[in-house]
Image (cartoon, rainbow, N blue to C red):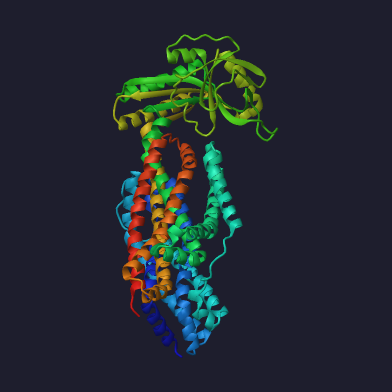
Amino acid sequence: MSSFFYGRLAFGNLKKNGRLYLPYILAAVGIGAMYYIMVALTGDEGIEKMPGAGDLKMIMGLGCGVILIFAVIFLFYTNSFLMKRRKKEFGLFHILGMEKKHIGRMMFWETCMVGLISIAGGLAGGILLYKLVVLVLLRITGLEVPFGFTVSKAGIANVAVCFAVVFGMTLVYNLFQVQKANAIELLHSASQGEREPRTRWILAILGILALGLGYGIAIVTENPVEALLLFFVAVILVVIGTYFLFTAASIAVLKIMRKNKKYFYRTKHFISVSGMIYRMKQNAVGLANICILSTMVLVMVSGTVALYAGVDDIINNRYPKDISFTGYGNMSEEEKASLKGMFQQAAEETGLAVEDSVEYTALSISAWKSGENMQIQKPGTITPEGKLVILELITLEEYNRLSGQQQELAEDEILVSVRQGAEGDAAYCINGRNFRIKEYLKDLALEGLDSNVVYDGYFLVVRDTQVMEELNEMQREVYGDVASTADYCVYADLSGTEEQIKECAGRMDELIEAYNQQRAEEEHLSVRLNVREEQRDGFMIFCGGFLFLGIFLGFVFLMATVLIIYYKQISEGYEDKERFEIMQKVGMSPREVKAAIHSQILKVFFLPLVMACVHLTMAFPMMNRLLLMFNMKNPGLFAVCTVSVVGVFAVIYGIVFGITARAYYRIVGEKR
């Protein structure tokens, strides 16, 4: 036979099975377009010249990897649905005299056609949508929109090569499936798995344990760094638990429902429960996939939306004043006065007035706390006892000046303010030096000292600079060259516009540079200068990039969820068609058939959504702690964003339910 015959036959097969292949091709086109857009964004010359390009490039590169891995898994998974429906057709070809090598040639042409359409469509869609996506990204991040239209050669090459390889892998897999099966197995493959599955209690118990352990990690873990490290462990446990529960526990629940005679012996429940029991073995993986993909959408989108919506809160926590600067290196009083004078000069020269300012000197020390004992030591030398904490020290003179109080302390007394950690200790012993806690402060509010959200924080007010220097010497002996210094911090609000404040910061940089040029290198001032609006712009780019990636990948996973649901309903529709025809022949009315179908779909369809919401609820505490690493301390805002995202997703899910339910009913109701 000529190759054109196989090509025509392949085209006819695809056309005949359009209901199956069209969604598959559209999904492949969509993923290809998104992958092209991500690759193009990472190499866009216009974006590379913009501020914050490094963060955006890193985020888009992460997106490229996720989409490519997902494309391989997703296309293989949906291909399995197609093969299940096509095996009967291939078996019929084989019985009619077609050899397996001929079937293989036909499958080769089918794969070539599907792959070519998918790759070409993906590239066309990606190129056409690229500019729109760039506009959305730049709008979210607040960057200027460049003119011009570009086509990424790297994006075209990546999509063509990667997707050609993926389709080639699916072809090899399909050929192997056909080659190892005989004609009878191919003909009856669509009806396999109809035996009643056994209840696997061990698997169900393991699923409950895995899920409980994953939930426990998410709820109990308090430290944000530990939460970041354990997040993926919790995710893996929840994924395993989800698969085990849907595979084993769902069968057990259905059998319990069957034993409830009042519930089971009703027409719609009898048909739906009995049908689901026999098919749950093959349904379980699909339902678990829908649940996990739904959870991924909810977690990613709610987290990134909350991060973006909380940018102002984050910036205000980190930079409470218009401008701030920190002098490092145990500055002398003369150097502090010089630095403050430069600030006043820069403000006057730019026509600004200092409206409100706070200044103080603080020493930050890391230590290991176990009860009342605090040990300053290098990790790795001796196994530390207790938890790593941050001690922030200021003198009593500084505290009285800032608070307007007139506290007094003995040499061995301290005042303590606990930001994160436990109160209740009567004293602290720091490397053998004993301090009695005179009072726990509730009113210590110093700009900038609340930026630590990773470790427990204890702010200590010591009697004088002599005590502070004693503690400073302790940590210098331990940490050597990497020991922290007593830093001089100034935070101020200025009258004027954002541009004037930025101009003031630039002028101050010039004055500091001129000051250092007149002094010896070892006497140079080491100063970090921050303007709140500049930091806000940079953080907006970072958070906007994550929001874009979250929505982008969320859309990819949502598309996958919809397609899996569609194929699941179509496959079950063809499998249930004969069963419902028999039931109608023995007296079941069309209305009863529709009620039974509705009951069955409702049970199966919304179970993954309910489970995804449970996963999200359990993950909320851990996600909240992860957001703390960005200085987002607004769990209320995060809760509102999460509920809103769940609401939107539930509406979309419900629309998909309506569409697929009608498709299922049309298949079941079709006349032979």
Asked if one can make out residue 185 in the rendered structure from this viewpoint, the answer is yes
Q: Is residue 450 above or below residue 267?
A: above
The answer to which image quadrant residue 607 occupies is bottom left
Asked whether 414 or 65 is in front, the reply is 414
Farthest residue, direction front: 262
Farthest residue, direction right: 382
Taking 432 as reference, is 245 left or right?
A: left
Asked whether 226 or 246 is in front, the reply is 246
Q: Is residue 381 above or below residue 555?
A: above
- x and y percentages locating residue 38 in the rendered image: 41, 56
Residue beneath the point at 36% across and 74% down = 587
The mark tally for this picture is: 0
Q: Is residue 238 above or below residue 590?
A: above
Asked whether 294 or 582 is in front, the reply is 582
Residue beneath the point at 65% across and 28% down = 377
- x and y percentages locating residue 467 in the rendered image: 59, 15
Taking 327 as reference, is 381 left or right?
A: right
Residue beneath the point at 38% across and 51% down = 551
Asked if one can make out residue 116 in the rendered structure from this viewpoint, the answer is no
- x and y percentages locating residue 549 in the rendered image: 41, 51
- x and y percentages locating residue 256 in the rendered image: 51, 57
Q: Is residue 469 above or below residue 322?
A: above
The answer to which image quadrant residue 460 occupies is top right
Screen quadrant of the C terminus: bottom left
